[in-house]
Image: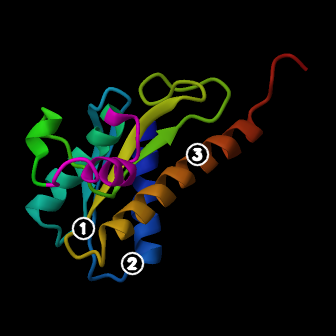
Amino acid sequence: MDEGQLIGEATLKVAREKLPPDRPIAVAVVNRAGHLIYFAREDGCSAIDVTMAINKAYSATQWYLDTIAVHSTHTRKVKPSDIVWYGDPRQAPVAGGVRVRATGGPVPREIAVNGAMAGAVGVSSMRSLSPEEDDEIARLGAMAFEGHRIESKKGERGTDG
């Protein structure tokens, strides 16, 4: 299973544990360049959920910030409606895009660079109580992936003793 799928499935699992069944989500995982490497949507997601999940993940990689921070930083300086200031129609400066970090050891090619930003996960649900709820699910999904990387590393045997 590739890293994008691991992150996406971890995020979906967290969502099903945390959210009631009437809150379907869309999950997107992008590599550090912002290119989509995994996508899933649960039954009942709206078309805007699909677009927003992808764009939230993309935005986190382009700004090197989680989108909740992009939102708070930039809405203090410009009106939220002035998205043209960003120069990229894919920017989604709303909560729900969270960077994924690699955590030590040999790292996979597509998603990770040792200890640096590996990519991002984006979560969107029009039925969320708030954008912060999308952010929490994305963050927990990213943490589940990082925990998986640590557990996988513990099970590997080193060659130097």
Q: Residue 56 placed where, x, y %?
A: 27, 48
Q: In this view, does 78 lie above or below 140?
A: above
Q: Nearer the viewer, residue 88 or 110?
A: 88
- Mark 1: few/some/many CA within 10 Å (<14, 14-19, 20+): many
The residue that label 2 is drawn on is 19
Which part of the image, by quadrant, shows the C terminus?
Answer: top right
Within the image, what quadrant is residue 95 found in? Answer: bottom left
Q: Residue 146 placed where, x, y %?
A: 58, 45
Say if the magenta span includes residue 94: no
Q: Nearer the viewer, residue 94 or 128?
A: 94
Q: Distance between the residues labelled 3 and 2?
A: 21 Å
Q: Which amino acid does label 1 sit on?
A: Ser
Which part of the image, by quadrant, shows the N terminus?
Answer: top left
The residue that label 1 is drawn on is 125
Residues marked 2 and 1 touching at CB (< 8 Å): yes
Q: Residue 153 placed where, x, y %?
A: 70, 36
Q: Give the range drawn in magenta.
A: 63-80
Circle 2: element type: loop
**Which numbered dot is residue 146?**
3
